[in-house]
Amino acid sequence: MDYLRELEGKRVHDPLGEKMATSRCIWFPGPVIVGAGPSGLAAAACLKQRGIQSIILERADCIASLWQQKTYDRLRLHLPKQFCELPLMPFPDNFPTYPTKQQFLAYLKAYADRFDINPVFNQTVVSAELDQRRALWKVKTRGLKNEEADYVSHWLIVATGENAENVVPQIEGMDEFAGPIVHTSAYKSGDMFSEKSVLVVGCGNSGMEVCLDLCNYNARPSLVVRDSVHVLPQEMLGRSTFGLSMCLLKWLPMSLVDQFLLLMSRLMLGDTARLGLHRPKLGPLELKSKSGKTPVLDVGTFAKIKAGNIKVYKAVKRLKHHAVEFADGVVENFDAIILATGYKSNVPSWLKESDMFSEKDGLPRERFPNGWKGECGLYAVGFTKRGLLGTSTDARRIAEDIYRASSLES
Ligand SMILES: Cc1cc2nc3c(=O)[nH]c(=O)nc-3n(C[C@H](O)[C@H](O)[C@H](O)COP(=O)(O)OP(=O)(O)OC[C@H]3O[C@@H](n4cnc5c(N)ncnc54)[C@H](O)[C@@H]3O)c2cc1C
């Protein structure tokens, strides 16, 4: 890329002493963005619109690697498209309300093309540190052949996402279990589980949807529901539950909207607790705003639970050779286990800074809407626990802030 100015090229000795690794130091005049998911793309586009060239460093070999490589085939956006579009470019009119994964990916590809965003792929950021004296960020990357580079810039935009690494719980007897144990990030469809008895651990949106998918492939899924969970119908009164909630929140306090959502859910789904899905004490919106825990938007799984096609179990105690023992002492045979146990941020593993980001969960310490800006040119996009809607807000703010700061400088 001709806009990269190479300041210094030097060779360093490989710590293993086996081969020499090349380390380059590259000064970049605009912001360095880490991560080419929807958040990184949105930040780059908003900056571009203000005439600021940025560079995206991405560990995978493609944009939106979470969506391309780590999601199941039947995935559609959980929220209606108007709440998921990136800044400056709406979804095409002919897209359905809930675009499929392939449609969303086509949209992201068109987005990158439209704003001429060309990330540098296969570049894992292994550290980023502020040079206090020069007020410059030094971002170290490692490529496929272990080659290293240091990108140096006034601005660092963290866009590595809330879902950068799989969360895999340690369950007693895991190495004893004879069947496959896979995380949802590796699950594509129920095809290979046909006629099999499968235990899905975790009852968020992914766990619930994987159960439905397994039913559709003639597998026999069971679901582990350890904690309380709010299950809401995806649509109410002919509108999306999310859209309706947003609308009601303009006029009513959150507690009242929560009461309305719970009443409608009761009328439409019945008493979920009777089937082992106990509701938290806080209402769905209040819980989301206080803890970030997302309610499940039911796309048909609950009917399968009601019909007895999906069994519900409490916490897993331990795994055996072909069976699972649950906390209440029940033991059942299973052929495979799918861990729908979620994801976590990886920021603390590479960002040498702990004022803006918490070392505990890798998320900004300040909550939405204040978590997007740190000190000395450090920014975060996509860590709001508000999905793509939060991404858009962050990306616009960051671009405006950097634009203002660079206008003042010049
Ligand atoms: C199954 C599923 C369904 C979802 N459905 C919706 C929905 O309907 N609506 C919604 O708003 N949200 C949804 N989400 C949330 C979703 O994660 C976000 O909307 C969106 O993907 C976030 O984009 P992002 O760019 O912040 O993070 P990501 O998409 O995770 O992108 C981050 C990128 O950073 C890269 N990266 C990570 N670490 C490094 C590193 N050290 N160096 C270089 N690159 C790195 C990753 O490879 C990745 O490409 C869903 C999530 C999942 C898992």
Image: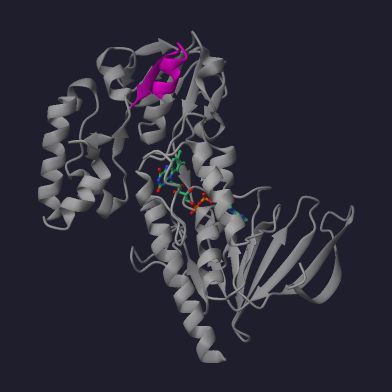
Q: Is residue 384 visible?
A: no
286 displayed left or right of 41: left
330 displayed left or right of 142: left
Identify which residue is drawn at 49% across, 16% down.
320
Q: Exactly how many numbered labels are in the figure?
A: 0
Along the viewing direction, whichever of 244 and 350 lies nearer the viewer: 244
Q: Position of residue 134 (x, y in %)?
A: 63, 86
Q: Quadrant of the N terminus?
A: bottom right
Q: Quadrant of the C terminus?
A: bottom right
Identify which residue is drawn at 54% across, 64% down.
45
Along the viewing direction, whichever of 6 and 183 lies nearer the viewer: 6
**Residues in magenta, as a range:** 211-224
Q: How is the image coloured?
A: one colour
Residue 368, by quadrant, is bottom left
Q: Position of residue 362 (x, y in %)?
A: 47, 57
Residue lying farthest to the front in this orientation: 94
Identify which residue is drawn at 47% across, 65% down.
380
Where 45 sits versus 62, above or below? below
Q: Position of residue 118 (x, y in %)?
A: 66, 59
Along the viewing direction, whichever of 377 and 234 lies nearer the viewer: 234
Residue 33 lies in the magenta-colored region: no
Residue 240, by quadrant, is top left
Residue lying farthest to the top in this orientation: 195
Where 7 sits versus 86, above or below? below
Identify which residue is drawn at 82% across, 77% down.
8
Q: Position of residue 77 (x, y in %)?
A: 41, 40
Along the viewing direction, whichever of 248 and 364 lies nearer the viewer: 248
Q: Is residue 297 visible?
A: yes
